[in-house]
């Protein structure tokens, strides 16, 4: 007698269960055959069953949205491991740079996505930014958005003023990135009147550190990488678009991303920058503009993480503006640290000091 | 600039575990994508507290690389489920000390489908015969849910039973089916 095929097996689900379907089911948004498909999975998997039961508890969905945002680990065990890994990466990168080697796939461990804080028992681990988070986010009202001010420090207009005030800029050697072990929340550097000189670009009138200041060579963004950008429905959709390896120069990639930003397409911009950060986790341009996008999408925990890292980044081109927007983010989160953040900016007598004083007065 | 090959999203859990043990941090992210929401749900089921549940998930993932180095894991899914569940149960015992994750490692929860191989391999005719030998409630539940593909809610409504009863009848019905099919196989051997 013939054995039943898998597709006709009444005990087997027809395909894999996506997170979206599971969550939709748990929220009670599926019925009939769609619910049955999920339930076939539940029948087979105790983990799914318990997960659904728990997700139906009061407050679960609201908390789940926050789960993927910045969060604190209770132990520095993983931090220690990854910081050590990061140091190893830097050492290897330094050796490679010294000997002019390029490296091949598999030789070097990628620098971990992690910011180490000063406290021994509170190390925030930067969770991967999920496609679903971006898709679910909502654009904030125009009056609540940041980064689009004409006279913001990261715009060409403001840069002209700064350059007029600061003649005699000297060249410095390009610097690589490094893993910081201090706490950027308390070490947001005071505004500087005389910045070190790094070559800048202005894409859509927005400031960008030239990639040659960040990397030994202009990186190529590998669009055929594993990541599935939000603009694709799924990996197969992406694969049907990219059948061959597609490399895009960093500058073109950033131009495209910031083009989305100026058009208020913060989801598209954040999605692009997520892709970039996936390949270059410490890219200060991506960190800063990801922070602005996240803020404008109401992803304030994410914004805090990005801007914190941009403000404390060794490449200090965005430190003032990132510190300002970081303070605004804390204020938005009703974090008591907002006052101190504004205070530091006000004391720094920099571009945003007057605005910060106004905020302090309002507090 | 692309110095290493990342674990791919279609890698199995066990491949990701190996990659993470080998220092590929992106494997951590992929495991997070697959499991964070599920483990959060498990934690919510037991702790009924969103903040504690979030902390539990974040804490577990922070410790994960270290735990995987110290504990051999053959099948990640039941293992991580067991760890989270045990952790919650230990936390619920009222011990106010920090629950150590190592204490939460225990025997894997066996996935139900591992026991259902007999059902998947049975042909329709033998299956129909076996279903007819179930008691009336189990037979109805198995028929409506597995053969007519009705949802839990539809079966509950049709039979006037609650969720727990339905799940119990389905589980017991499949177990009895398996026994019946095994008996038939033994008799024909």
Image (cartoon, coloured by chain):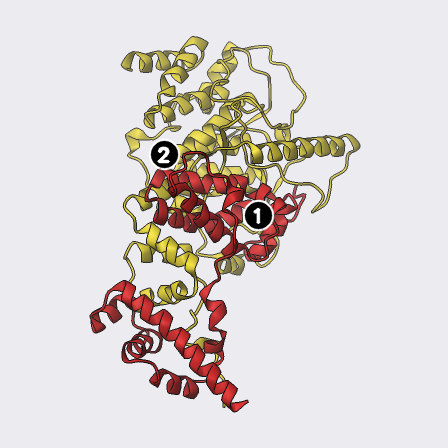
Tell me what residue is drawn at x 52 percent, y 33 percent: A75
Q: Residues within 10 Å of mark 1 (few under 14, many from 20)?
A: many
Whether residue A179 is visible here, answered yes or no, is: yes
Image coordinates for residue A51, horizontal then vertical, percent: 38, 53
Report which quarter residue A267 is drawn in.
top left
- Select label 2 or label 1 by which is in front: 1
Q: Which mark is residue B112?
A: none
Q: Which chain is yellow?
A: A
Residue at the disc numbered 2 = A296
Q: Residues within 10 Å of mark 2 (few under 14, many from 20)?
A: many
Identify the residue at the far right of this view.
A99
Tell me what residue is drawn at x 43 percent, y 71 percent: A12
Whether residue A137 is visible here, answered yes or no, is: no
Q: How many marks?
A: 2
Image coordinates for residue A124, horizontal then vertical, percent: 49, 32
Q: Colour of chain B?
A: red
The chain ID associated with circle 1 is B
Tell me what residue is drawn at x 51 percent, y 16 percent: A189
Check the image and report above or below for A307 versus A1: above
Report which quarter residue B14 is drawn in.
bottom right
Do callouts 2 and 1 point to residues on the same chain?
no
- Nearest the camera: A294 or A172? A294
| Horizontal arrangement in the rendering, residue B115 relative to residue A247 (left or right) | left
């Amino acid at each position: 007698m013939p054995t039943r095929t898998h597709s006709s097996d009444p005990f087997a689900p027809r395909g894999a269960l996506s997170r979206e379907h599971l969550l939709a089911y748990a929220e009670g948004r599926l019925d009939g055959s769609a619910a049955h498909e999920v339930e076939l999975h539940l029948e087979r998997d105790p983990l799914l069953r318990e997960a659904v039961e728990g997700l139906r508890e009061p407050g679960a969905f609201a908390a789940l949205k926050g789960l993927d945002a910045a969060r604190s680990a209770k132990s520095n065990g993983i931090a220690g491991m990854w910081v050590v890994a990061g140091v190893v990466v830097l050492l290897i990168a330094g050796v490679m740079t010294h000997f002019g080697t390029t490296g091949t796939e598999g030789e070097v461990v990628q620098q971990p996505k992690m910011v180490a804080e000063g406290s021994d028992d509170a190390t925030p681990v930067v969770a991967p930014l999920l496609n679903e988070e971006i898709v679910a986010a909502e654009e904030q009202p125009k009056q609540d958005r940041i980064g689009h001010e004409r006279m913001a420090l990261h715009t060409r207009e403001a840069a002209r003023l700064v350059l007029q005030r600061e003649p005699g800029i000297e060249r410095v050697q390009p610097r690589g990135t490094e893993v910081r072990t201090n706490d950027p929340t308390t070490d947001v550097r005071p505004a500087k009147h005389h910045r070190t000189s790094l070559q800048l670009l202005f894409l859509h009138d927005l400031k960008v550190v030239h990639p040659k200041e960040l990397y030994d060579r202009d990186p190529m963004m590998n669009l055929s990488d594993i990541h599935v950008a939000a603009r694709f429905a799924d990996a197969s959709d992406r694969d049907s678009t990219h059948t061959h390896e597609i490399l895009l120069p960093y500058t073109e990639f950033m131009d495209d991303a910031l083009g989305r930003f100026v058009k208020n397409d913060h989801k598209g911009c954040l999605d692009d920058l997520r892709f970039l950060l996936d390949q270059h986790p410490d890219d200060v341009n991506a960190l800063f503009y990801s922070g602005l996008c996240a803020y404008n999408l109401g992803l304030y925990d994410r914004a805090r993480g990005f801007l914190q890292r941009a403000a404390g980044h060794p490449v200090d081109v965005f430190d003032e503006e990132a510190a300002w927007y970081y303070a605004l983010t804390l204020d938005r989160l009703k974090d008591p640290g907002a006052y101190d953040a504004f205070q530091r900016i006000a004391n720094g007598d920099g571009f945003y000091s007057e605005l910060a004083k106004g905020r302090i007065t309002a507090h | 600039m692309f110095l290493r090959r990342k674990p791919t999203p279609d890698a199995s859990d066990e491949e990701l575990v190996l990659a993470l043990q080998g220092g590929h941090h992106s494997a951590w992210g992929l495991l997070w994508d697959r499991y964070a929401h599920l483990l959060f749900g498990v934690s919510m089921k037991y702790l009924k507290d969103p903040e504690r549940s979030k902390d539990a998930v974040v804490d577990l993932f922070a410790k994960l690389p270290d735990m995987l180095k110290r504990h051999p894991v053959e099948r990640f899914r039941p293992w991580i489920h067991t760890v989270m569940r045990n952790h919650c149960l230990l936390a619920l015992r009222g011990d106010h000390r920090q629950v150590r994750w190592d204490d939460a490692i225990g025997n894997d929860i066996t996935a139900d489908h591992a026991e259902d191989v007999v059902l998947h391999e049975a042909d329709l005719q033998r299956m129909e015969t076996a279903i007819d030998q179930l008691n009336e409630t189990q037979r109805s539940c198995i028929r409506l849910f597995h053969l007519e593909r009705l949802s839990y809610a539809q079966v509950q409504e049709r039979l006037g039973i609650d969720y727990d009863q339905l799940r119990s009848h389905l589980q017991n019905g499949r177990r009895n089916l398996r026994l019946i099919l095994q008996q038939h196989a033994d008799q024909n051997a």
